[in-house]
Amino acid sequence: MYAVRIHQHGGPEVLRYEEVPTPTPGEGQALVRLVACGVNFIDIYQRKGLYRIDLPTALGQEGAGVVEAVGPGVTEVKPGDRVAYSNVLGSYAEYVLVPAQRLVPIPDGVTYQQAAAAMLQGMTAHYLVTTTYPLKPGDACLVHAAAGGVGLLLVQMAKRRGALVVGTVSTEEKARLAREAGADHVVLYTQQDFEAEVLRITEGRKLQVVYDSVGKDTFEKSLNCLALRGMLVLYGQSSGPVPPFDPQVLAQKGSLFLTRPVLWHYTATREELLWRAGEVLGWIRTGELKLRIDRALPLSQAADAHRALEGRETTGKVLLLTGFEG
């Protein structure tokens, strides 16, 4: 089989499309023949070495395809099942071993590309608005990178829960997409100061929560946008990691809350995983949740996918396709 692996950390050029042995499932594992896999910022962080992983390895954290074979003790799936997963390293490949406990069924009416596009980013948006800070009617929130893969889904889910949504974007085209997703107000951060705009929009009342995937460049002003006892949810760092800071700042700015969540901790049990994935994929099946797939490239072009995502050229999801039809 073919996979895209890295043997050292660095730029997109370290991604190698190479032939490797097809693995055999062991106890509790399933071998999945992938049709599509998602590209995410965590892949870039791992490629660069910001998040440490053992090398050499295939990158990629999510995918969708068909169960090819199962190992001993597997009861959750069987060969021929249409499945998707996230938080399993090695998805830039034609075949991947996945713990059967991490596989979820793809509902009829949902394509492999849709499932691969929805798993990591869709469940991330889901836990952010339902659990990390459970939005309720009347709340006001800020979504940074509102036209990105998570951002567009996050805006839609926040509106489902009755919140007022302010989104930040870099271009007029991205502003249009954020508005189409339901954002009540969109701030072009390249032309406007988002902190000042939040104060204007809320008439000085500020926000209950900021969902921030940008990190270093937005962190301080994100804190300034929060109302008394508001929460900054830092779930990414596309501009770089936030420098160390004194927690006393949180007290000075209004007894604020700061959290740095990851999806793995919000799908820790199979029950929670099936609930989140089931809701996200179900909304996609009924059309209640709209996915935007920016581009779908052959697996061999993973480096181009990284360049596009890292260069903020994308709006919505980036996928890699193996060429299998399922």
Image (tube, grey):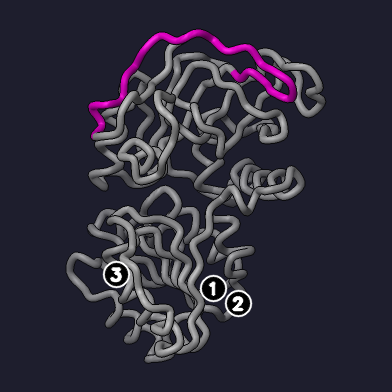
Rate crowding at label 1 as few (under 14), some (14 to 19) or many (20 or more) other CA atoms within 10 Å.
many
Quadrant for residue 28, please give it: top right
What is the spatial separation of the Cα atoms under label 2 and label 3, in whole angstroms?
Answer: 22 Å
Q: Looking at the rendered structure, which numbered label has been put on residue 6?
A: none
Residue type at mark 3: give it.
Val
Q: Earlier in the sequence, mark 1 or mark 3?
A: 1
Q: Are marks 2 and 3 in contact (CB under 8 Å)?
A: no
Q: Looking at the rendered structure, which numbered label has been put on residue 163?
A: 1
Q: Secondary structure at mark 2?
A: loop
Q: Earlier in the sequence, mark 1 or mark 2?
A: 2
Q: Secondary structure at mark 1?
A: loop
Residue type at mark 2: give it.
Pro
Residue in view at x 30 percent, y 33 percent: 9
Q: Are marks 1 and 3 in contact (CB under 8 Å)?
A: no
Quadrant for residue 300, please give it: top left
Q: Is residue 230 left or right of residue 130?
A: left
Which one is in front, 77 or 57?
A: 57
In the orientation shown, which residue stands out farthest toward the left? 191
Q: Looking at the rendered structure, which numbered label has been put on residue 137?
A: 2
| Residue occupied by mark 3 | 187
Residue in view at x 23 percent, y 76 percent: 193
Q: Are marks 1 and 2 in contact (CB under 8 Å)?
A: yes
